[in-house]
Image: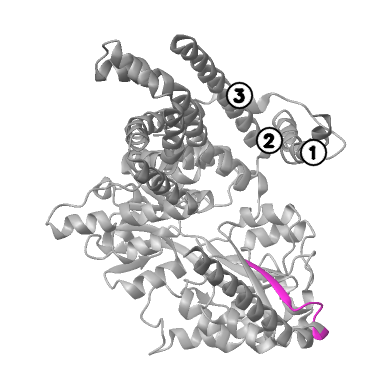
Amino acid sequence: MKKFFALMLGAALVFGGCSSSSGSAEGGSEAESKYSSDTLKLYNWGEYMGENLISDFEDQFGVKVIVEYFDSNEMMYTKLQAGDAYDVLVPSDYMIERLMAEDMLMELDHSKIPNLSNLAENLTNLDYDPGNVYSVPYFWGSVGIVYNKNNVPLELLEEQGWNILKNTDYKGDVYIYDSERDSFMMAFKALGYSMNTEDEAEIEAAYQWLQELNDTMEPAYVTDEVIDNMMSGTKSLAVVYSGDAAVILDENPDMGFFMPLEGTNLWSDAMVIPANAENPELAHEFINYVLTYDASYGNSEYVGYASSNQEVLEAMTEEGGYYAENEAYLPRDGYEKDEIFKDNEVLKQKLAELWIKVKAAQ
Amino acid sequence: MRHFKTMLYPYLVWIGVMIVVPMLMIVMYAITQKGNDVTTFRFTLDNFAYFFSDAIFLDVLKRSLWIAILTTIVCILLGYPTAYFIANAHPNWHMRMVLLVTIPTWINMLVRTYAWMGILQDDGIINSFLGLLGLEPIKMLHTSFAVVLGMVYNFLPFMILQIHTSLTKMDKSLLEAANDLGADRLQRFLRVTLPLSMPGVISGITLVFLPAVSSFFIPKLLGGGQFVLIGNVIESQFLTSGNWNFGSAISMIMAVIIMISMYITKKVDRNVDERGV
């Protein structure tokens, strides 16, 4: 028996070794002459890319893509600072602002990204990077409340906005997104402040708002688990990113999506090339590929976030489109109380300190 | 013997690079202010003062110690009888049962903890089964029950194996002697077996308590975001707040607490030894 296993193991090693070496030898030489190497290192959010995008790109260009995942901008930043080299990153707006300020990004060569012309108009002149000098938008969205239409009337949501999360009728029936940025955003908005405020009294008031919520509502603080749980309708209310909400609504027709009238966070994630990238040529090729209609469509359909590609956005939302009936897919545009997060290291740290204290109090 | 000493050098280099240097860096971060560059250090004890001045952090520390102690107690209560049973089992079964205890540890801890999420969650395996029987679902995930369960599950093999080792090493003729001198079963266990197996229990305690008190992914996965233990506070200082100095200070405080508890267990161990022999 032992011998049999050893034999199997040996065989697996030999065959495994063969197939991988032949695989890289194949397109390798061609790709290597065009780019500095045939490997692209991508650092992206988890569950944030169409199922076939990577394999299609690999087949088409004869290259290999190594993907690593992060679950917060801060985690990505920490790894980047530790000296890890990637070719393409997909951070959020405020983090790109910081990376730009710290000279950690490479200027993009627009001649190598002809598909830039596919970008949706409202994404070509974003505050943090006008003219897309360093970044190419990937997805954009907002933050809102997913609610069970059978248990929560829309009128009540409209009347109470973010404060419905403190309505004790829904005690133990609420998911809060476990991130200081989004939690303080809803507290600031509920109190009528700007989410970029630095005013001590306003921060203190928001801290108290969250403490009250924590003390009275028995909330569950979750991250990506919220998607599966709301699909199966575990709780009535949840704070969710718009794209995740689109996927939830797609699965569970009882669920609705509401963006509170007090305003919310409009954000965008974009592809950038870090200054220490080892294969910037291939990185440009990849960014260009993601902007094609097919890649963008597959991406947006699978992940549920609003595409940065104008034609895909139209195809998704026009009559008969995949997300035409889905109220969470397209973020509301041009509402004056909606804001974009500005990079503010001091404020962010302060909120992070307060957030761990909110959660730790029991 | 002397020529064996040179074989130690690779290990010494390893200790130096992988243990001593990182420890010194933690100490360095803990006693300096944020925003140091290479040339200027501003020393401070504020990081420690901040920890002890805030009741919330002390609560978290208390909670972490309590959960770890509870985990250790449950591990002893479950682990001792199991180890005793295995040690006294028929030799044919002996190794198979030890294997059964060890097999789960071949799989990555994180993976096994994720599996518990699926078992415990509101629409998980247990609650689906209860639903089939027409019973109300029980909320198990995101409670302290789930956290302690996850820790006991992950750390129990360490306890069983330690106790098992000390039980099998025991000289069985001592039991026969006790029998000859008129001791009954209970007396034989309490006065011979238990004292002689104490070293195993003590090292089991060390192996369970230490990882339990500093664990951060088990409370995070099974306790949910609202279940904050000291390991989670440390993690958040490094990954979200970016306050490495405060994170290092808490790590140092934890290191001191762990050293004190190891000292106490050592001391208990020695007392037991004196009594036992």
The tag on residue B7 is 1
Q: In which quarter of the image is residue B31?
A: top right
**Callout 1: chain:** B
Mark in the foreground, 3 or 2: 3
**Relative horizontal placement of residue A230, taking residue B254 as reference (left or right):** left
* Picture layout, residue B122 above or below residue B237: below
Choose the circle earlier in sequence order: 2 or 1.
1
Identify the residue shown where x is 35% and y is 72%.
Answer: A249
Mark in the foreground, 2 or 1: 1
In the image, A293 versus B137, the foreground residue is B137
The tag on residue B245 is 2
Spot occupied by residue A226 in the image (x, y as percentages of width and height): 39, 59
The tag on residue B43 is none
Q: Which structural element holds mark 3?
A: helix
In the image, B3 versus B137, the foreground residue is B3
The tag on residue B256 is 3
Spot occupied by residue B87 in the image (x, y as percentages of width and height): 37, 35
**Callout 2: chain:** B
How many numbered circles are shown? 3
Q: What residue type is labelled 3?
A: Val
Badge 1 and badge 3 in a common chain: yes
Spot occupied by residue B134 in the image (x, y as percentages of width and height): 11, 57
**Callout 3: chain:** B
The span shown in magenta is: A33-43
Choose the circle earlier in sequence order: 3 or 2.
2
Choose the circle earlier in sequence order: 1 or 3.
1
Q: Which structural element holds mark 1?
A: helix
Label 2 and label 1: CA atoms lie apart by 37 Å
Identify the residue shown where x is 44% and y is 84%.
Answer: A317
In the image as oriented, which residue stretches furthest toward the left?
B134
